[in-house]
Image (cartoon, helix red, strand yellow):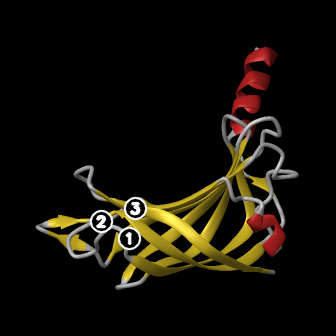
Amino acid sequence: MLFRLLSGAAVLFAFVPGHAAALSCTLTFTVTVSQGVGFIRPDTALQGTATFTTDGRTVPSDAQTTGHLAQGEMVIEGGIRSRIWSVSVTHRGDSTELVGIFGMEATGLSFAGIDFSGPMVLTLFGPPGSRDDDAIPMTQSDWDRMNLRRNFALMSGTGDMLSGRVTDLVADCT
């Protein structure tokens, strides 16, 4: 009986959010469209921002990924916007590192009867060892190290996608 009680407590503990430093960030960037939608053609440059605040709650995941619960908004030129809910950081040390900013409930893009309502993601990959830990990058230098591949994507419920390469990333975190 004691073993069952302790096992149940261990499982429950695994789902309790952890804690990290709370922070606020504003990112500005350019998306060079590679897969367009409607009148947004490939090679079009769209300006974007992602502004978010974390309160220090984290959710551990598999593959050495930590989800930092966040509140904020991602906006892409043309009135496309999404509510940010999570910033995930994968830190393995010996393989590609990842910082992903995840939005949901996107609005502002519809074409041919298809609503592009999300998810909306900004993914930044860095070479092995580019992250020291699973914390969200704080300095411009931290963000600059995530330079192996940088992508933006907005999905529809039908599998269509607006996507592109992210450049000119400027970060201001406090």
Q: How many marks?
A: 3
Q: Pointer 1: what residue?
A: 43
The residues tagged by marks 1 and 2 sit, at their Cα atoms, a distance apart of 9 Å
Q: Pointer 3: what residue?
A: 163
Q: Label 2 sits on what residue type?
A: Gly
Q: Nearer the viewer, residue 69 or 16?
A: 69
* 113 is higher (above) or lower (below) than 174: above
* 43 is higher (above) or lower (below) than 153: below
Coordinates of residue 171 in the picture (x, y in percent): 71, 78
Q: Residue at x 32, y 65 (%)?
A: 117
The residues tagged by marks 3 and 2 sit, at their Cα atoms, a distance apart of 7 Å
Of labels 1 and 2, earlier in sequence is 2
Q: Nearer the viewer, residue 31 or 136?
A: 31
Q: Quadrant of the C terminus?
A: bottom right
Q: Pointer 2: what residue?
A: 36
Coordinates of residue 145 in the picture (x, y in percent): 77, 60
Q: Quadrant of the N terminus?
A: top right
